[in-house]
Amino acid sequence: MDAPLLDYRVAFDQAPVGLVLSRHRLMIDCNQELLAIFGAAREQIVGRSFEVLYPTADEFQRTGERIVAQLDEHGRYADDRVMKRVGGRGELFWCHVAGRALDARQPHAAGIWAFEDLSSRRVLKAEFTAREREIAALLVEGATSKQIGRRLAISPRTVDVYRARLMRKLGASTTAELVNKLLTG
């Protein structure tokens, strides 16, 4: 019996992670797993801005700026962030995003991005503001207040205020307990 013919299109469509090809922050192609992760039909994704996958337009904008500022020399970037499902009620969920700009000098011109749904391991229980979601994601990465402040262009004291709000919302008494609750839901 002959093995099924495998080509790049089959590999892309059947990859076990969500994949998107982009140009100027528009999704020009995606695979089946991405549609499943975001609860979307193909026409809700292809040809649309990545903005439809973010909880707010502001988070979309700030994430784009952060990606540009933090690409490595090979045009790669990765983080965990809160995203929004397209189908249904627009449920928010934790997602790992990794990708690369095909030309690091033009970060949004063209790229390939991988998405992994983390909701089975990390649950969003409390209602967080957009800024709280950004800070929570960076705390989980192990960033300090100073590092978070630099990445988000806010003061470390402002980061501390947001950290205190997150701790209150989740009933955590230490940063380590907060990070644990963020990771485990």
Image (spheres, rainbow, N blue to C red):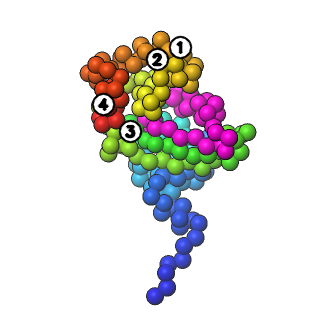
Q: Check disc 3 and report the residue beneath it.
A: 93
How far apart marks 4 and 2 lie (CA) works out to: 18 Å
Residue at the spot 51% in from the left edge and 62% down from the top edge: 13
Q: Check disc 2 and report the residue beneath it.
A: 159
- Magenta stretch in the rendered image: 57-84
Residue at the spot 51% in from the left edge and 29% down from the top edge: 59
Residues at circles 2 and 1 in contact by the CB criterion of under 8 Å:
yes
Q: Nearer the viewer, mark 2 or mark 3?
A: 2
Q: Name the disc covering residue 81, or none.
A: none
Q: Secondary structure at mark 1?
A: loop
Residues at circles 2 and 3 in contact by the CB criterion of under 8 Å:
no
Camera-side residue of 169 and 76: 76
Work out whether mark 4 precedes mark 3 in sequence or the reverse, and give the earlier one. Answer: 3
Q: Amino acid at mark 2?
A: Val
Q: Secondary structure at mark 2?
A: helix
**x then y, percent, for residue 66:** 59, 30
How far apart marks 2 and 1 lie (CA) works out to: 7 Å
Q: Amino acid at mark 3?
A: Phe
Q: Name the disc covering residue 155, or none.
A: 1
Q: Amino acid at mark 1?
A: Ser
Q: Quadrant of residue 49?
A: top right
